[in-house]
Image (cartoon, rainbow, N blue to C red):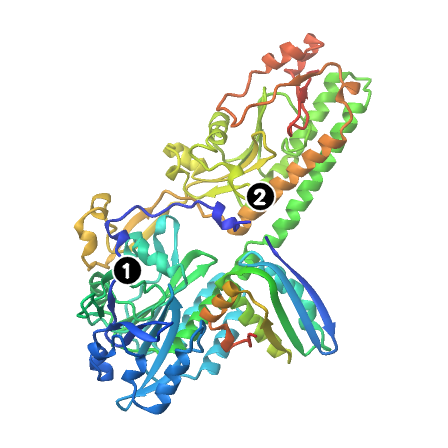
Amino acid sequence: MSISVSVQASGPQASVMLRGVLDSMSQAALKQQLEPVLSNAAISQIRLDFAGVQSMEAASAGMLMMLSHTAKSRNKAIGICNANAGVLALMHKANLGKVIPIQ
Amino acid sequence: MPSIRAHIWNGRPAPCEHDSLPLARIGTVQPHGVMMVVVPDTGVVEHVSANVEDILGVPARAVLGQQPTVAFRDAESAAKLTEILRPGRRYFDNPTMLSANGRRFEAICHVRDGRLFIEIEPYWPAEHDYPTMVTAALDAISRQTTVQGLYAAAAQMMNFVTGWDRVKLYKFLPHGHGVVVAEKHSANSQLPNSFLGYHFSASDVPENAKEILRTGKTRQKPTQSASVPLLTRGPDGEVRESGPSVDMTDAWLRGIHPCDNGYNRNLGVGSNIIFPVCVDSTLWGLFVVHNKEEKFLNYDTRTVIEQMTMMFVSRLIEVEASENRIDERQRLAVQMVGAIEAGQEMLSNAFAARSEHGNAVRLQAMQAVSRHVAALAPTYVSTSGVDYAMPGRAEDKFSTDLLRLVDADGAAVVRCGTGGHVHLVGNTPDPLAVRGLTALFGSRLPAFEESGWRVFATDALADFAPISDEMKQAACGILAAPIGNRGDMILWFRREHVVDAVWAGARPTEAELHSEMMFRSRADFSPTQAPLTGASRPWLETEVLLAAQFAGAVGELWQRQLRSAPPLQAGLPSMQPMQQMPQPVAMMEPEPVHSGFTEAASDPAAAHRTGGIFVFSPPAGNAAWRVNG
């Protein structure tokens, strides 16, 4: 199963709803789908909504760190919310909170 | 749906005597830190390491059954511990800085099996602060565009962050062996020996150790001093060793097996730390960092390295896909499915057309179309049970593309049914052996129906079936994907990839793997030349996925054709339904041409001229037909 993305933009804020499984096979698709958001100069805050993410692998934590790096280089803030317990546990194990705010 | 990785059955390590060492439940703790295992509901210490008195100045008997705060008298540390013990906490902002006896400590907490683990390590300043380290790592990793460049950059960053003498990036190979693919030494390294390019035997990492590494847990061993026991209270209140009762899989301070300590001493290493590189749930490799003297890394430094390892994996997936032109091959797959569809249209038109030259000529033209699309069109026409395509020949471009799709040395398209057909491309086993392989699914090889993706890949077929050396030259690795449910299949092959390897010390023999020798520390790391055999180049996960998707798309095309096809009888001289084949397909020789001819012939003289032609229509669940012209 891959990942699907839907974006709702409101002024400088973009809410990115993710759905599916975040693993080594889906990260390229996610990056590709997020590129328009990262390239949009009008957006300064990106909220990744993980409510629809069933599971996540550690490599994807690395991808999110690099995504955060890209966002910062384009003057955008990025945050994560609504992750389920399993995904949240992995994020904490990876100390992802040190790089990206997790709500 | 399970990951595609679940369908890759690469060569497994040979079983070894020390595989089942109880490493996660070793019952000991490394001597440089204190471990407390707390019952969250009561906040009392259930287990504590025997060194608590040496490090915190409080005897174990005074800690067991009490709150951890008993070991920390300053108010600030006690308050922080009280916050850690707040009921219901599952996540912790590690590390928490504590003080005791005038020393600074880091408390690192996690919950496992309903117990709160508090690991207390002396604080050591880092070479750089966290933001500097993580920014440098992100920059270095994200800039890389080649796999080898990424390996080198990651090893260099590990060296920058740790400042240790030697960093090795170790990649696992088929059958659990490994090779050092990158190495970085400090300018003033006290460990000048290089292991770059050296192979290490699978038995160097016991299976139970790999099991823990697969969880992504870093293994730090800053000192080679002996571990100390974890203690608890017995039924009568006496203090005794905890034994294997505590699972320390996620613990930093998990004790070290004496055999492991000896291994490092024999390497001349005082401190080592191992960061597993996991791609999803598979252990891809290890960063192994060595220092001659004992040296400690604080928690933030270890965190940066763990995060860098995750970034490394993420970037590796991208760079590997780019180097292997996965995008290009995905486009190729789409084009090939289009070519099959176009080929089918030509075949259908040919069926419907009237030819002034007679059926034989018409059907021979149709056979050429079938060959053009490697017998993958729903309808195909065959003059015999076997076709051979030559990679590189212009008229066999489609067959060549079939190899390019997954970077194979050979491929076979197997059509089942009476008078079934095998289309071979490149370096393959003979048709009989190919049919034999297809018959193994569901017995020696897994059944396709048991999981989400309908595909199977291995780089070591000999681990599943007794195959000859000759067979290994063609099919040491196979990647198989069924089309539909009747036994039609595409198989891709890779020949055995023999590496003229240099090993760090001699590999243990089969007898030694099952002997007490496996519980003694290895001492010989001198270069030893021996070939690494028994496996093909491994299939990439993306290649396996591509194969599954391609076969799936062809299967869908067959289904569409089945639903929309007009009755074939209109344009053909004579047709009879073929019998469906039972599952699984039996091993068989392609049927002789004449057996089909006798039943279906309308013009024996024409058949004699052409050698007989079979026409097959979509077999997906319904009757198929054949005819000869």
What amino acid is at disc 1? Leu
Mark 2 packing: few (<14 Cα in 10 Å), some, or many (20+)? Answer: many
**Neighbourhood count class around disc 1 (C-alpha, 10 Å): few under 14, some 14–19, many 20 upward:** many
- Looking at the rendered structure, the secondary structure element under dot 2 is helix
Looking at marks 1 and 2 on the same chain, the residue that comes earlier in the sequence is marked by: 1
Q: Residue drawn 50% across and 69% down?
A: A91
Tell me the residue that label 1 is attached to.
B23
Q: Secondary structure at mark 1?
A: loop
Find the distance from the CA under tag 1 to the CA under tag 2.
38 Å
Looking at numbered disc 2 in the image, what kind of residue is underneath it? Ala
The residue lying toward the viewer, choosing from B369 and B117, is: B117
> Total marks drawn?
2
Inspect this view and state whether residue B471 appears: yes
The C terminus of chain B lies in quadrant? top right
Asked if residue B73 is positioned above or below residue B150 in the image, the reply reads below
- Using the image, determine if residue B334 lies above or below residue B394: below
Given residues B383 and B278, the one toward you in this image is: B278
The residue identified by callout 2 is B548
Image-based side of B352 in relation to B113, left or right: right
Whole-percent x, y for residue B364 in the image: 70, 22
On the image, the x and y values in percent for residue B34 come to 27, 76
Q: Is residue A31 above or below residue B473?
A: below
Q: Quadrant of residue B473?
A: top left
Residue A45 lies, in percent from the top left, at: 66, 77
Residue B200 visible in the displayed image: no
In the rendering, at what x and y percent does residue A40 appear? Answer: 71, 73
Q: Residue at x 65, y 63 (%)?
A: A32
Chain of the residue under the numbered disc 2 shown in the image: B
* Tag 1 near tag 2, CB within 8 Å: no
Chain of residue at mark 1: B
In this view of the protein, which residue sits in the foreground, B190 or B510?
B510
